[in-house]
Structures are given as C-alpha cells and as structure tokens.
Amino acid sequence: MAALASASRMQHKHLHVGVSVPREEPGMGIPISKRSFLTTDDGVFDYDRAISLSVRTHNKHQQNLANLLANVGEDTFAMMNRVIHPKASMPASVKRNLEARQAEPLDPIDGEVAWQGNVTIGTPPQTFRIDFDTGSSDLWIPGKNCTSDDCATKAVFDPSASSSSEAQEGEFSINYADGSNVQGDIFTDIVNVGSVEVKKQYFPLLIPIMGLAFPRISKLAQDPFFVNAKSQSALSNFQFSFYLAEQGSELYLGGTNQDHYTGEVEYHEIDESSGHWEVVGASAKTLFDAVDGAYMEDEINGYYAYPCDSEPSIAFSWGGMDVNISSDNLNLGKVNESSSDCIAAISAQDLGLGDGTWLLGDAFMKNVYTVFDMDKKSVGFATLATESSQ
C-alpha cells in the first residue's frame, strides 16, 4: 500500500506544524487483512518477491505519471518535477524462481504486500475481495471473460447478471511486467464498501484493486469511489482512516475509529497536485548515512541492510509527534541464511516522483493511526491505543 511521501527528522521548509483537531463523528469500519509478506518462514528476506513488488510498484507509478500527464497537460506536468521512466521488466531469474514456487509474479499493480477487504458490486450484489491502495485512483474488478491464472483464483464480475450495470465507451489497457498487454471493458455500476454506496462508479474489468488517491492520476479520467461517495452524500465526512496490525486491521470510511487511537489527530497539509497524498522531505540515503553499519545492499532496487543485532532507532516527524518505526516493522529478514545483516523495509527506489519523495507503506503505518482528509487536503496521525499498538 502506497501511503504518502514523508519527511524524516530533517524538516523541509514547506512543511507545516501539525494542527490538532477533535475526533470526528462515526463512520463505517471495513475489516481488512494483509495478503502476503516479504520475509520467509526461516526469517530470510524474500528477494524474489521483493523484486517482483519493486517492478510492480515502479510500473504502477509510471502509469500514474502517464495518467497525470494526460489529465493536466504538458505545461502543468513540466512544472511538477516529475519524470516518466520506462516500464520496468521482471528479471528472467526472478520470474523463473517465482514460477518454480508456483507464485503469480506478473500482475502489474496487484503487489505482493496488500491490505484487502470486501466490496459488493451490482444488483443483486456480487462480492469481491480487493486491495485498498492509497497510491492509485481507479477501481478495477476481474471480469467473467478473464482467462489469466490470476482470475482463476478470484471472483469475477458478470455485468449481464446486474440490472444496474451499464457498459461504457472505450477500453482500459495495462502493461504487465513481462511486457505483455491486457485490455478490459469499462462499466459503471453500484458499488458498496460496507454500507457506503456509490452509484454509477466507473471501473474496468481487470484485477481487483480500489484506488483511494486523487482524480488527477485516474487512467479512466473519472472520480474515484471515495470522491463519488462524498458528492453523492453517501458520507458526511470526507475522511478515511487506516489501522494496520497483525490482527483486526481496518479501513474506516467517513471519519476515525476512536477505539484504535488515543489523544487528538495531528494534521499536516499535503500537496495533491501530483494526484498523490504527498509531503516532500529528506532522502533515504540521508537516513541510512546516519545508521551505524548500514549499507546499500541492492543499488538497482534501493534496498539497504544493517546489522541485525543493532536495530536502528528511526522516527518520522513533521514538527509535532514522533512516529517511531518498531524493529518488527523495519526488519524484512536476513540478507541470506548465513548473514548477520538484515534488510530494511525503507528503500530508495526512484519512481520519478521527484527528489526526496518517499512512499511510506505499512512499515510506517503500522506504528500510527493514519487519517486521510480530502476536504482539508491533509494527512493526520494519532498515537495507537495501548490495546491496538504493535
């Protein structure tokens, strides 16, 4: 899950000190769970899956930037300090290794580490388990005509079985990591997440994912589900929040769940011009230069290693509360079975999003209650409740 770009303890001149805001009125909690991990059962970093994820993350943001260019035009895009890199390809050795393990390495966006929950689509409702992603904007659903191995293991949408389904003009296409291309028809229909219902939501028939970012990076050039939920008055509060944990994880639509945090939420302004939840700050290199014994283990993919028996103390701050990254959330496992060094969950992959831009996923978000506010264009953080903390 791509969350937001961040600053470390080195403050950026455009960051704003957080404003504490009272807790909001109740919304709707959606149970979610983690789909996969990057550490093997024997405590070793799963290099093949990690590289697969890196390729997918690269290609997702390459597509996001292409969407941004198409939606805002060349002149505006040129002022954003963004670079559209070529599509990444899965290394042949990684592809062979994953296929030998009977993994599914070729989905372009559907990453190995994702937080999933249920949605229903259509009349009568058809149920799907999808990835909730704050780093993209479109809703994708597998269609009944999908013949890939991935679709064989998932529920598929049958538009002919929904009285509220409407076919739309055009076709949605996406490039896979192996260089192939797939297309999907575009439909609109009723979509329900919990009790939050949106009518005439656009989606292509591809793989299951729901984007929670801004319309500027929509490949469909349509409003995302959460934007439509607000405009259709399905919600009175234009916030969604995440509590991520080994058990009881939750996406909360329309506010915050007071059971999972203490105190008040500290909000910080974001720059939504790129379509992402983004605050700009220091680089990963700056961070790891300050960690004794740390070094770049994989320069191509940006993975850092550090001595396993000397866990670094890392915290992120925007001028208010410190968000400390726990050892469990930082450590992705030993470099190899005989190594005494471990791979850090914070990496330095260049996605073309600009200097100093980080994507903070669950390695960060499992340490704090995180609130995304589209009205205020801000991201908020609160201290986890004792019973919820890792």
Image (cartoon, rainbow, N blue to C red):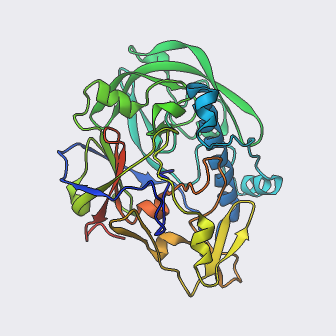
180 sits to left or right of 273: right
* Residue at (49, 43) in percent of width and height: 276
256 relative to 348, above or below: above
Q: Where residue 208 appears, x then y in whole percent?
A: 52, 37
Residue at the outermost right position: 92
226 relative to 198, above or below: below
Q: Quadrant of the C terminus?
A: bottom left
* Residue at (42, 56) in percent of width and height: 15
Q: Where residue 92 appears, x then y in whole percent?
A: 82, 52
Q: How many marks?
A: 0
Residue at the outermost bottom position: 309
Q: Quadrant of residue 316?
A: bottom left
Q: Quadrant of residue 295?
A: bottom right
Q: Where residue 132 appears, x then y in whole percent?
A: 45, 44
For the question of whether residue 216 can be seen, the reply is yes
Q: Where residue 294 appears, x then y in whole percent?
A: 64, 79
320 relative to 71, above or below: below
For the question of whether residue 67 can be seen, the reply is no
235 sits to left or right of 175: left
Q: Quadrant of residue 244?
A: bottom left
* Residue at (56, 66) in percent of width and height: 345
The foreground one among 362 and 38 is: 362
The foreground one among 114 and 223 is: 223
